Amino acid sequence: MARGERRRRGAPADGARTAERAARGGPARREGRGGRPRGAAAGAALAVVVLSLALGLSGCWLLAWHRARRAVTLHSAPPALPPDSSSPAVAPDLFWGTYRPHVYFGMKTRSPQPLLTGLMWAQQGTTPGTPKLRHTCEQGDGVGPYGWEFHDGLSFGRQHIQDGALRLTTEFVKRPGGQHGGNWSWRVTVEPQASGTSALPLVSLFFYVVTDGKEVLVPEVGAKGQLKFISGHTSELGDFRFTLMPPTSPGDTAPKYGSYNVFWSSNPGLPLLTEMVKSRLNNWFQHRPPEASPERYLGLPGSLKWEDRGPSGQGQGQGQFLIQQVTLKVPFSVELVFESGSAQAGGSQALEQLAGSLLTQALESHAEAFRERFEKTFRLKEKGLSPEEQALGQVALSGLLGGIGYFYGQGLVLPDMEVEGSKQKVDPVLFPPVPLFTAVPSRSFFPRGFLWDEGFHQLVIQRWDPRLTREAIGHWLGLLNADGWIGREQVLGDEARARVPSEFLVQRTAHANPPTLLLPIAHMLEGGDPADYAFLRRAFPRLRAWFSWLHQSQAGPVPLSYRWRGRDPALPTLLNPKTLPSGLDDYPRASHPSSTERHLDLRCWVALGARVLMRLAEQLGEAEAAAELGPLAASLEAEESLDELHWAPELGVFADFGNHTKAVQLKPRPPQGLVRVVGRPNPRLQYVDALGYVSLFPFLLRLLDPNSSRLGPLLDVLADSRQLWSPFGLRSLAATSPFYSQRNSEHDPPYWRGAVWLNVNYLALGALHYYGHLKGPYQARAAKLHRELRTNLVSNVRRQYQATGFLWEQYSDQDGRGMGCRPFQGWTSLVLLAMAEDY
């Protein structure tokens, strides 16, 4: 997946020695020899050499400078989305949203300088010292399970969060109106996890508002530190007001006693909000409900002193941070209401505040509408799936939609500076400021955009709301640089950057990623939606530029071959140098990286791209593009060419090709630890014996004719329990492989070396379904395998969800348990399409 702080996000230089030195800042080595010239002739010769060298160096420098400039220049093609497509004037219903996936609950506007809201909470008095403050989703904070029960991607959501003995339910609903995105309301309910609990804890909720510029917030405080409301004004939102309603018992309207604290300061920077609140929770207060014993709690300073501006007004223009703490006994509910001035003034009479029973009615109405729309869209009940499986499908969709984020900022880019076989030394440079509207793989571990994940995300989302998919793909295509490159990981804005180690922030313009956005594009081509067609017409120049860059920049050593740039160098600590740009990270490739490699999966992705772009060009009447793409698509899909470059007779399957030996292993060598030892036979140019997901790619992407003689052997290894078949789905690497379940280094456990991954299993299900409906010698077998694989895969994901409350990044091929990070409601949400048999 090539995405994270764990083991896959660093992108070292290409495997060549020259590139390795260049990446480390060292000079490229140039070898040469010759005698020293003598006399006048020697002087003339030397002058010619110096002049030629100077001209050559200046030419190299100019070319390098030109490449560096293009690397951080946005593509000149017209945008795929209309101007100001994220503004409240163009898309008012999408302007506000839960676009902060890394926090447990929060909302923001789709704006470069957004207004942000969020929730923190803490259970008082359970541990000595400062209570645990919950805010951002963390992998190891002990919270969970958590996730969205319902989320429609637009105007409504309901989430449940388990935190020890507490169960929180966060809900929101939006009400359209006016010119600035309308109104919305939250309800946060806190209850004991177990019924009949005698000792009810004291809990503090912290509701906050953050501005990111010169916007105005004006708090109106009432008695005992309670804010009556917060009024404000921004250029995008006009006038607005926040109101924190009095707490009540759940399901009741009678007010419940709460203690209040408030804090107001300049915005310290979004990544520092949690620490600022923690540092201010250093004063003891008394919670004194009527007819009950008082209890101590840690609270924020109880005044609205405008702090931290400094003697010269430091903090002016950097935004404001205003937070209200409300503390009371569980169980309770608290509501926060946002009202837009233009929405309130838009009708003939003032709108009733969306709170209390009116909010309850709106939430229930939206929940029922969600259920009805879900069944109409996916027909799980109609297909006979159980109530538990239907609930799993709703959670899979809702978690994916609830993980959509809006990001804005500048990424770091390292231009490809290889000129005439050497690399010029260059420092990373800032990409222009860009927005990105995208789903994320994991709210806790990967809360940002990943290119190859997003295509799989949008396969699910477009079935539910095609407009959201057009918005997301349009934003990704907006990241195109002048050469047609898109960075595979997008770290945009302070909040995203704060969660990524600095050494992993840089994206390299030589490195590609699987072009999975073509999968939802292909679905658009088949759907006949006029809005999709209009979008594809606008997007075509950018799609073509992106594909052209991939086809040209990743070209391999012989025609119609391709090679992922960016493999790790052959370091002595690595069992098999990783190929992060492929998305399959530690999947075994040639043991000794070289420019002679031919990567099967990349060729198949390029073949898919040529096919999709050719069909799109034909539908759009782009004759010149169709004429160019047609021969390439035909050549890449020709089985003779595929066989010539990638069929390994000695292995009986398709395979990578490169400088390879199986005689590699990690052995302990004190004090270095585990080091790679290469035995005999020595590496040589040959097909790579690494049976697994890569071997299946011509089948996975449906590039084989249903009568192909190669289809049978692929179905054989797919169905063999000694190879790829497991009771829980297809394993990523054959159980008979010497790399199966082997760690790649002392600190790098196996990743794509046996575990079951939903995205590739979904591709396999789609391929089995496809070949199972086409006449051919393997039709019946493909149909049977489809039924069995679907049952295994769905049953295991359901069992693990019921046992843990999470969808997981990957699943064990040994016992089916969830592994990796969680919640992982990115491409694991494809389980919904598997249940719906929608490929």
Image (cartoon, rainbow, N blue to C red):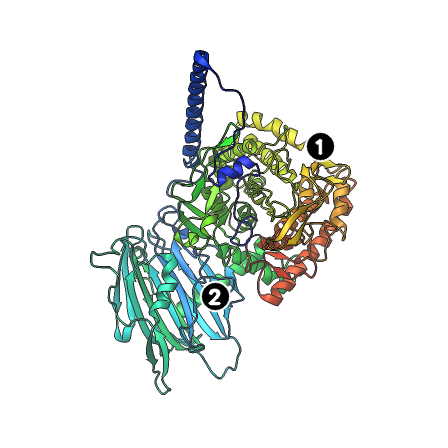
Q: Kindly indicate the quadrant of the structure image that contains residue 70.
A: top left
Q: Residue furthest front?
A: 39
Q: Secondary structure at mark 1?
A: helix
Q: Residue furthest right?
A: 777
- Residue 626: in sight, yes or no? yes
Which residue occupies 73% across, 54% down? Answer: 788
Rendered residue at 35%/64% (across/down): 276
- Amino acid type, callout 1: Glu
| Element class at badge 2 | helix
**Residue drawn where x is 49% and y is 43% of the image:** 473
Query: Quick check: 57 above or below 217?
Result: above
- Measuring from the top left, give residue 795's x and y in whole percent: 67, 60
In 3D space, how far apart are the residues under numbered discs 1 and 2 (Cα atoms)? 55 Å
Q: Earlier in the sequence, mark 1 or mark 2?
A: 2
Furthest toward the left, the residue is 312
- Decide which of 141, 166 is in the foreground and name it: 141
Read off the residue under disc 1. Answer: 639
Q: Quadrant of the rendered structure where residue 564 is?
A: top right
Task: Name the mark on residue 364.
Answer: 2
Q: Within 10 Å of the Cα at label 1, are there few (<14), some (14-19), or many (20+) other Cα atoms?
A: some
